[in-house]
Each structure stands twice: as C-alpha cells, then as structure tokens.
Image (cartoon, coloured by chain):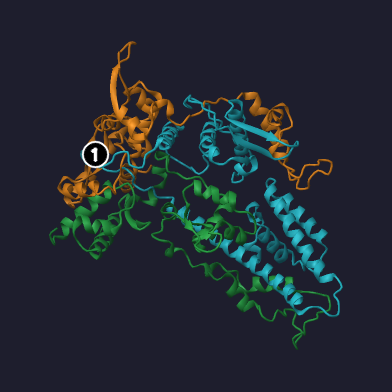
Chain colours: A cyan, B green, C orange
C-alpha cells in the first residue's frame, strides 16, 4: 500500500514534510534513533534518483534537517530534576505540531492530485467563446469595455504567437515550449510591478532546464536593451533583476525566432 | 414569454450560443421571462438531448452558468485547432498551493506558507498571473492581511460549477496506518520519560493528541 | 479518421463550436481527414437536423466558412442578452485583429490576415463599423491595396495620446553562440549536486543558473 503511494518520482520530493514523511515511512526511520547524517545520506541517495537537481528541494531539506536536529537535541539534553511541566508539554506539542503538519501536507498533496485529475478531464473540452455575430454587434453598449492598452498588447502577442499547423494525430499538446519572445513579453509585463526580483524566483515553476535557458536569454536580451538592470553579488550567487522604469522599446516582436529547444 | 416550452428552449439555446462565458441561470430567466427552475429544467433537457444524439458538443454548467463546449471525445480534433486558451501545466508546487487556497479560502499568503511549510509567495504569484487565484479583500482582524480565493477561471479550468463540488478534503487525509507509522516514528523516544507512562507502556503516549483526535482535529477544514 | 460518419459528424460539430469565426471547409477537411465534399455533406445534414429539431441555433455558411449562429427566431432574446452588457464586448478574434492594426499600422487587410493566420475580413469590417479602425489611403506600391489604421476614437477610448504610448513590445533574436554556450553549461551542471561547494563562499549554490562561460560575464555586473 505504502509502496504504491510513495513510489519515488521527482515530483514526490517537492515539499520538505512530504520528503520527511517519505523517509520515515519508506525506510522505517526512527527519527530519534537514527543519526541525522544517515538521513542526509538517504536523502542524497534519493536525489541521485531524481531526474535533475531541484535546489528548492535541497534547501527545504536543510530546513527540515535542522528541525530534526533541534527536536532531537532537546530530547537528549540532560534535564534538570525540576523540569517545568510547561516546558515538557511544549516538547510534546512540538512533536504533535510536526505530526500535524506532516499530515496536513500529505492531505493537500493528495488533494492537489485530485485537482489535477479534474483539470485534465475538463481540459478535454474547449468552451465556446465566439460571442454574438455581426448582426448584434451594433447593439453592444460598450465595445471596448474592460479593454486597456495592456489587453491590446496581450492580444497582439496572442495573434502573433506561433500557431501549430493544422494536422491530425495529435499525441499531446501540453508540451508547448516557451519561446524567447513570449518570455520577454511576459517579463515586460511582469517586471515593472515587481521591483527587484531574483532570477530563481522568476523561474521557480519551470519544469525543464531548457525553459530556464529561455528565461535567462530573455533576461539577457532585456538587459542588453537597457530595459532592466542585473546584478550578481558572487559567482553562482543569486541574480537580482531590477526593471529600469525609463526603458521604452517599441519594436514589435513579430518574426522573432522561436527557440524551441 | 409564453408558456410554449419550445420557444423557451430555443431562446436558451440561442442565448448560450452567443455568450462568450458561462451565462448565469438567473440572467437567462430574466431575459426569457421564465423561472430559474424552468431554466434549469430546460438546460437539463437540452444537455440530455445532445447526449442522446451524440452531438460533438455539450451543454454544461460551469462556474455558476451554462455554456457550450466541445465534447471530450472530440478532443483530438479541436486541440490542434484551438491554441489560445490552452493552459500550460502547473508545477506540483503551484498545484499544492492551489489546493490549499481552494479548500481553505479565503486565506492569507502567510497562512498558505504555514501549511506548505515553505514560502508560498512565488507559487501564489504564479497562480494569480494565471488568473486562478485572486485577492478578494483584507482580513478584518489585526494586520489586515490580504486575503485570497480562487477565481471563476479556476472553476472553469476544473469544469466545476462551484467550489462546493470539490471532492471533500477528508477523502485525502492519510489512512490510519500512515498516521500510526508517523506517530510511532516521531514518538519513539529512548530517553527516560518524565511524564508518567500509561500502564500498558505504549510507545505512543501522547495523552492529549492521540492518533484519532490528532488526525481529525489537525487537518479539519 | 475512420469512415465512421458519426465520428466525422461529432468532429465537425466540435470544431465549429469552439471556433470564433467561420471555419473554411478545407480546414475542417484537413483536421478531420475527410474530403471537402464529405465536409459539405456532413454540414448540410447537420444544418438540416438543427432545423427539423427546431434548435435555437443554426449552422450556416458565411464568409467562406461554417459557423454556429443563433436562430433568427430567437433574435429578440439575443438582443436583450447583448444589450444587458453581460455578453461579449469585443470578441477575442476582433481584439486580436485590432491589436495587429494598432501595432503594425498602416497595413492592408491581406497583411492582417497573413499575421492572424486566418481570414480577418469579418473582424476588420466589425472594427470599421465600430469606428475603431479606418481606411487611410492606398499602398503606393503595386496593387495599391487599401491601408488601414486605428482611429482617434480608439486612442481616446484607451486613454492614449498616440499609438506610441501603447505598451512596448520587444524585438529579440538571440545569437546562436549564446544559446549554445548556455546550453552546454547547463547540461554539464544538470547532474545532482545538492551540497554547496565548500570553497564557494556563496550562500546560494545555484550551478544551473550561473553559466561559467563568456555569457556568464554578462550578468556578473
């Protein structure tokens, strides 16, 4: 039962509590008996089985490891004879809290899988969005209601996006690669409102390295155009990106090479 | 509007056909001058007709209204045709965050982060950009944190009429054996225990938070 | 596509249902992998079915393609709906066409169609009728096509002084060598390596985000 549910896949390792749950259940780890070093070892072994490195997971693991060390040390430290009953209860509640969070995390992880199934089922149908035909258009009270300059830009980008050539035998469409121009347009839309942002945050939801590459290229190009400022305190350090509020660039995107990796 | 059900039927079909988003039954009722119950009945009958005639489209109730959409069986034909409106897959981090918002709404970013155990700012931003989550106001309490909830687009994406149709969260609570295994692992403690042991020397002494009430009380929505 | 006419029928219904403008029979034929004659036959039969079932919609051939429209008999209800303001403002097709004119003006109808990838005649007519787009002259080149641009009313409605105030787009073509260098660098670093390098004083061990080659120098400002 547990085997099936916690089968090792990259996506299983996104939350620290989920990871902990996995380690405890799968390897029957007694967290108070085992050395934290052993947990780290088993974690590294799991990382080896992951398709690619996920730094967020790695840092999250450090957090949970620290929590464990803290819990463990508070158990192992000699207590004075006159241990405050409140302190003792606090220790209990600490463990209960950890258990509660593990369970809650696991619950929402399962719920998110259910949402994904619902979305996949609904995604097989496309809603009609045609609107009234020409005969009724002169009746529309406010034709541009809710339409602003940004909507016009978004519509232009939609219209000029690379369209697939109609053909049958579609195996899957979910794998639409990002193109640099799409990403650049996206960044131009997002960055001005974000102040200074770290590159990793911009790309945290991407799945593949090629997508990260495309984002990086887009940032590079915007930098080259003087539309944003970029700084990196140390090699391999965080790349901070700041929108240059004076930047303006009006050339359209049409005809840009789509880099499809 | 007459009592002629054929006219009501045609009117409903015509209105939904020219709509670009789900039309609330209340609005249809107003326009066609029939009761909301009649609207619901007419729509149910139409949906059934399309089904039995094996049409390539269906009439569904989504996000609080009725709309036409292509039948799932025709997926392969329409997917290549329609590009805009296709939504990219969400990462599992974003999906988990979305699930938390969906079941706990309205709630603040900090509350989402507390449940996820990690900072949820990035995932929340992604969900807002995709139009699946929106800010709906401020917490009236101290700090007046911004509160977030899911959008109609979220319901449309999932094909749901309302969030009440989400599968009950209790279905996803880990089974008793998982809880027990976790608890045993967390509670096992070799150090002398200053708290009086239960008579049976159980390894699971948590007196006030046993597995039963612990699981229920903690994850209850 | 099989010879099963039921499947062809459903596919045609689904495609036309999700289309936001008339779909040419040739395109349907391609998508469903049947002959254009079959498409015409299927559409004729569908139109007849809707007629005999007294549906509130009809399948019609306009502007060289097939589309669903509300039935003329339901006109009064559709009008009420449109006037209620709950219906579509600018359809997404019309908005995209308007955006193309806004950013690329002046240009001909044929150029708009070429960019949209589909016939834009209908949308252009609509935009002209609504006073958002106007003809401003003839192309001095061969063919002397009519050229179109947005109207002052369009700018005014958007609160802009001139089209120069539209949100900037970006023009970007990455150099092939930059892509290669980055890709090579990322591939090399893609294996698991969760432990920060001890000699690297940085607190953020992000090997996948920090190319080491020449292009890396660009960001290390």
Quadrant in the picture for residue C116:
top left
Question: Where residue B118 appears, x then y in whole percent?
Answer: 64, 56
x 21%, y 41%: residue: A139
- On screen, A2 above or below C105? below
Residue C77 in the image, given as x and y percentages of width and height:
19, 50
Quickly name the residue at label 1.
A137
Residue at horizontal 61 percent and vertical 73 percent from the top: B215
x then y, percent, for residue A115? 50, 58
Q: Quadrant of residue A239?
A: top right
Label 1: chain? A
Vertical arrangement, residue C219 with respect to residue B158, above or below: above
Residue A95's x, y, as percent? 71, 71
Q: Is residue A24 left or right of residue A171?
A: right
Q: Residue at x 65, y 26 (%)?
A: C178
Is residue A98 visible in the rendered image? The answer is yes
| Residue A140 as seen in the image, left or right of residue A104 | left
């Amino acid at each position: 039962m547990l085997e099936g549910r916690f089968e090792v896949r990259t996506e299983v390792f996104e939350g620290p509590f989920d990871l902990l749950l996995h380690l405890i259940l799968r390897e029957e780890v007694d967290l108070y008996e085992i050395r934290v070093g052993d947990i780290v070892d088993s974690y590294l072994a799991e990382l080896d089985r992951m398709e690619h490195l996920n730094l967020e997971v790695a840092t999250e693991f450090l957090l949970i490891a620290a929590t464990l060390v803290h819990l463990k040390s508070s158990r192992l430290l000699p207590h004075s004879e006159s241990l405050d009953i409140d302190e003792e209860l606090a220790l209990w509640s600490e463990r209960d809290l950890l258990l509660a969070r593990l369970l809650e995390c696991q619950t929402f992880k399962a719920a998110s899988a259910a949402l994904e199934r619902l979305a996949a089922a609904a995604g097989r149908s496309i809603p009609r969005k045609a609107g009234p035909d020409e005969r009724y258009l002169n009746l529309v009270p406010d034709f541009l209601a809710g339409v602003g300059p940004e909507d016009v830009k978004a519509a232009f980008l939609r219209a000029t996006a690379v369209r697939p050539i109609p053909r049958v035998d579609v195996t899957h469409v979910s794998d639409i690669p990002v193109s640099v121009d799409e990403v650049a347009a996206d960044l131009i839309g997002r960055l001005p409102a974000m102040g200074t942002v770290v590159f990793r945050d911009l790309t945290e939801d991407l799945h593949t390295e090629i997508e990260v590459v495309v984002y990086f290229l887009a940032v590079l190009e915007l930098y080259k155009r003087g539309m944003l400022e970029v700084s990196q305190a140390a090699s391999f350090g965080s790349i901070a990106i700041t929108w240059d509020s004076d930047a303006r660039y009006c050339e359209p995107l049409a005809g840009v090479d789509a880099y499809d990796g | 509007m007459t009592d002629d059900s054929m006219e009501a039927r045609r009117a409903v079909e015509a209105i939904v056909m020219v709509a670009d988003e789900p039309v609330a039954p209340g609005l249809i009722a107003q326009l066609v001058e029939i009761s909301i119950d009649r609207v619901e009945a007419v729509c149910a009958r139409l949906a059934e007709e399309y089904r039995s005639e094996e049409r390539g489209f269906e009439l569904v109730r989504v996000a609080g209204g009725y709309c036409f959409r292509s039948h799932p069986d025709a997926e392969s034909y329409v997917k290549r045709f329609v590009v805009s409106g296709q939504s990219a897959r969400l990462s599992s981090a974003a999906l988990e965050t979305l699930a938390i918002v969906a079941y706990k709404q309205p709630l603040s970013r900090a509350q989402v982060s507390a449940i996820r155990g990690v900072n949820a700012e990035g995932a929340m931003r992604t969900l807002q950009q995709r139009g699946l989550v929106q800010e709906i106001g401020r917490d009236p309490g101290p700090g007046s944190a911004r509160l977030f909830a899911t959008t109609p687009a979220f319901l449309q994406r999932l094909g749901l009429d309302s969030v009440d149709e989400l599968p009950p969260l209790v279905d996803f609570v880990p089974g008793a054996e998982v809880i027990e295994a976790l608890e045993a692992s967390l509670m096992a403690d070799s150090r002398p225990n200053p708290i009086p042991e239960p008579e049976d020397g159980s390894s699971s002494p948590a007196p006030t938070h046993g597995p039963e009430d612990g699981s229920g009380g903690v994850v209850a929505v």
